[in-house]
């Protein structure tokens, strides 16, 4: 699965928002896109005057123009979030992947058990977004450079949905979302494959996230 979050995490359910559907949708569990878990998101659409759900025409349902069919609509959440970038207020990190199909190309709308096993939600469904807590991010979730180091601030990258690091003394117009607590590497050992080893340097990072402080700070 294209999960940018590793298993160790600490957060309260009181700090999770379950209102927004992710505008970005991954094609399959292996797609490492902005529909993945571990993506930092912003509010895209927050019109509370809309109904609690929209009924739309969607190709995701397959063929919907059968004769004598009155209506065949797909329910979606009208409130939307999207991967955040530099200079935007961040609401939190996605805890599940928003995905259309399983690894065999079969639509997950027809297999809710498989969907839950993949820790996923469907296109248009609300995705849980954690606003604060401790999270372990894989190397796909942040900019892997010398600035992403323990003790530095975690800020939003110019690459949508990703984190970057910056020393406190060097902050200027950065969207601060937390503190980098530690980094490390996961590798396969003793002939045993590490499921979360990732690729390249197999780096990971523990970040204390608090998106309530996500404002633009100028040194």
Image (spheres, grey):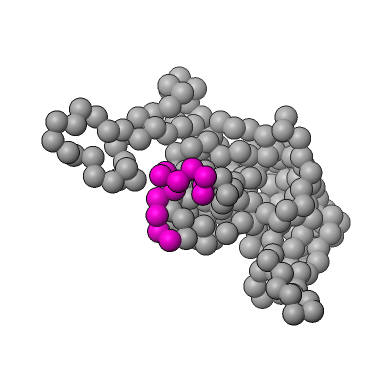
Q: Is residue 122 left or right of residue 173?
A: left
Q: Which is more toward the observer, 92 or 122?
A: 122
Q: Residue at x 43, y 21 (%)?
A: 51
**Residue 145 visible in the snapshot:** no
Question: Residue 206 at x, y = what percent?
Answer: 79, 55
Question: Residue 172 at x, y = what percent?
Answer: 73, 52
Which quarter of the image is occupied by the N terminus? bottom right
Q: Give the total number of marks visible in the rendering.
A: 0
Question: Residue 107 at x, y = what percent?
Answer: 40, 50
The stretch of residues the image draws in magenta is 104-115
Q: Which is more toward the observer, 218 or 82?
A: 82
* Residue 152 found in image quarter: bottom right
User: Would residue 56 be counted in the magenta stretch?
Assistant: no
Q: Residue at x 46, y 23 (%)?
A: 52
Question: Residue 175 at x, y = what percent?
Answer: 69, 47
**Residue 75 visible in the snapshot:** yes
Q: Which is more toward the observer, 23 or 107?
A: 107
Q: Is residue 146 left or right of residue 129?
A: right
Q: Residue at x 76, y 45 (%)?
A: 209
Q: Which is more toward the observer, 195 or 143?
A: 195
Q: Is residue 47 left or right of residue 201?
A: left
Q: Is residue 52 above or below residue 140?
A: above
* Residue 215 found in image quarter: top right
Q: Residue at x 70, y 73 (%)?
A: 193
User: Would residue 114 be counted in the magenta stretch?
Assistant: yes
**Farthest-out residue, bottom:** 191
């Amino acid at each position: 699965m294209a999960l940018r979050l590793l298993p160790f995490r600490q957060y309260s359910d009181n700090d999770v928002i379950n209102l927004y559907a992710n505008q970005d949708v991954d094609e399959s569990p292996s797609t490492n896109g902005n529909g993945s878990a571990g993506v930092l998101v912003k509010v895209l659409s927050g019109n509370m005057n809309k109904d609690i759900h929209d009924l739309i025409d969607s190709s995701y349902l397959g063929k919907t123009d059968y004769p004598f069919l009155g209506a065949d609509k797909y329910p979606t959440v009208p409130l939307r979030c999207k991967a955040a970038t530099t200079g935007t207020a961040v609401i939190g990190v996605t805890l599940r992947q928003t995905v259309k199909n399983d690894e065999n190309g079969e639509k997950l709308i027809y297999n809710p058990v498989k969907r839950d096993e993949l820790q996923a939600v469907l296109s248009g469904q609300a995705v849980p977004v954690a606003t604060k807590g401790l999270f372990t991010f894989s190397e796909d979730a942040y900019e892997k450079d010398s600035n992403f180091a323990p003790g530095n601030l975690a800020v939003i990258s110019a690459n949508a949905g990703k984190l970057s690091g910056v020393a406190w003394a060097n902050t200027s117009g950065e969207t601060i979302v937390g503190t980098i607590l530690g980094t490390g590497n996961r590798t396969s050992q003793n002939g045993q494959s590490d499921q979360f080893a990732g690729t390249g340097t197999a780096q990971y990072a523990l970040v204390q996230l608090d998106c309530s402080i996500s404002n633009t700070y100028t040194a």
